[in-house]
Amino acid sequence: MDLEFSNLGPSQFDEFERTYSDLLVKTFNHLNIKDEYEVDVSIVDNARIHEINKEYRGIDRPTDVISFAFYDDENELLIKDNPHKVLGEIIISYERATEQASDYGHTLYREMSFLFVHGLLHLLGYDHMKKEDEAIMFGLQDEILGEVRNMFDKELLLKKANEASKLSYSPYSHFAVGAALLTKDNKIFLGANIENSSYPLCMCAERNALYNAMLNGYKKDDFVALALSAPTPTPCSPCGACRQVISELFPKDAPILMSNVKGDVQETTIAQLLPFAFSEDDLK
């Protein structure tokens, strides 16, 4: 199976090509589909999806996703010129996805993934016009997406943390650390350790990433995950000072991905790293 991907939105949505390729394979495997198909997916803005809705569906407004199937229920080809056995086309509005992720209080990654799987199931003949059909389709969506509330691209976040370590200013320790902080609207803020000849003035990567995000208007509840990378034999753990700061500025049960440059990864939370954190309650 192949994915033909087109992004007419901001460049940050290019990263969904890999996500959608993975979800395409996962969906076909879950449904035990052996046939080889190609699926076309386009990321567009509200104006473009509005035009398509109006022209082809008689709907005079933008929607989040549209699916055009090239086969009918009997697997008969609806479009004659289809040499690559294209299953159909999925069109997703990144603007509607962004709005909905904010409205529902979850990540843009989750919303974009949900819309793709939803559109793909439509191409495969599933619908939600009747309650019994809706239960089947939505049940499949949840099974395919797994723990959708916590979905994010861990591989990408770890890659960004590793890239951030190259921005480190560490002429004294020669110990370069990078951090990457993911927000609910799919922004990634980087941090690296910055040293000073007056050692107490040094600043760790994790704190730089958190402060960077907060200086751009983000708050504790906006954060989804934190990744860090360092040249350690095993996955690098935050220092005590960073654990204290993370405990106040980062959700206690959100994932923290500790890694090293070799690619070893350990997932934890700040609740596990600092179970008896000093907090504002201790100041009352």
Image (cartoon, rainbow, N blue to C red):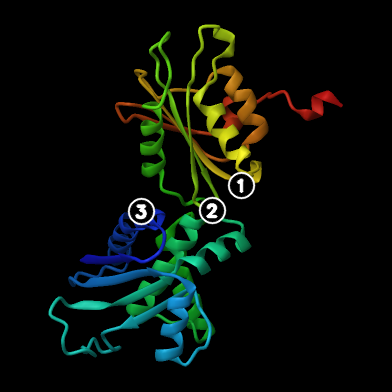
Residue 63: tell me if it is visible: yes
Q: Which residue is mark 1?
A: 222
**Image position, residue 202 (x, y; %):** 54, 15
**Image position, residue 80 (x, y; %):** 17, 90
Spatial distance from mark 2 to mark 1, Cα to Cα?
8 Å
Tag 1: Cα neighbours inside 10 Å, few (<14), some, or many (≥20)? many
Residue at 62% from the left image edge and 36% from the top image edge: 250
Tag 3: Cα neighbours inside 10 Å, few (<14), some, or many (≥20)? few
Q: Are marks 2 and 3 in contact (CB under 8 Å)?
A: no
Q: Which residue is mark 3?
A: 15
Q: Amino acid at mark 3?
A: Glu
Q: Which residue is mark 2?
A: 185
Residue at 42% from the left image edge and 71% from the top image edge: 92
| Horizontal arrangement in the rendering, residue 204 relative to residue 281 (left or right) | left
Residue at 42% from the left image edge and 10% from the top image edge: 173
Q: Are marks 2 and 1 in contact (CB under 8 Å)?
A: yes
